[in-house]
Image (cartoon, helix red, strand yellow):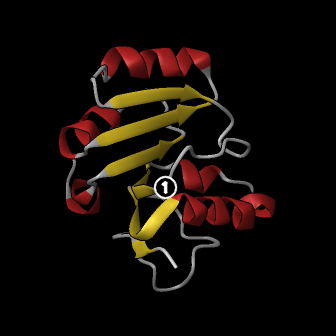
Amino acid sequence: MLRGSAGRAAGDVLEPACGTGQWTGSLAARARSVTAVDASPEVLGIAQARAASPNVRFDQADVFKWRPPHRFDTVFLAFFHSHVPPSRLGDFWNTVAAALAPHGNHLHRRGPSRGRPRGSGCGGASAR
């Protein structure tokens, strides 16, 4: 079950680095659509088995190279951003911002805040 900020995911949701789909099914229950992206075919297969839903699209891709097919109302990050190398943080946050529709939100489950603009908080921040 999603609680707190993750429970506010709505509209069209992007879940980069979805991993085994721990959050994908819960996101799909609240969203119009979910695009779940992961680089690992093995992990993506687990996510597909765990969170199969007509409103979920799974894409195998390197999230550092992948470009969204459209803008999303919500970008949901579960732990992944804490694994982004410091040298790639700027590009990572630019990709998140580019994926968001105007007034969209990025929501993150947990992890260190290194590189995140001060004041954006764990509840998400509006796109610029």
- Left or right: residue 77 versus residue 82 is left
- Left or right: residue 55 versus residue 97 is left
Residue, disc 1:
71
- 49 lies above or below 38: above
Give, as a three-letter code, the residue at label 1: Arg
Question: Residue 125's quadrant in the figure?
Answer: bottom left
- 100 lies above or below 40: below
* Number of numbered markers: 1
> Residue 65 in the image: x percent, y percent?
74, 43
- Left or right: residue 127 versus residue 65 is left
SS for callout 1? loop
- 103 lies above or below 88: below
- Residue furthest to the right in view is 87
> Residue 97 in the image: x percent, y percent?
56, 66
Q: Which residue is pictured at 20% across the width and 54% down the height?
A: 3
Of 31 and 7, nearer the camera is 31
Q: Residues within 10 Å of mark 1 (few under 14, many from 20)?
A: some
Q: Which residue is pictured at 58% across the width and 55% down the height?
A: 82
> Residue 114 in the image: x percent, y percent?
62, 70
Of 114 and 24, nearer the camera is 24
Q: Which residue is pictured at 49% across the width and 55% down the height?
A: 71
> Residue 35 in the image: x percent, y percent?
44, 38
Question: Residue 4's quadrant in the figure?
Answer: bottom left
Q: Which residue is pictured at 27% across the width and 32% down the height?
A: 25
- Residue furthest to the bottom in view is 119
- Quarter in which the N terminus is drawn: top left
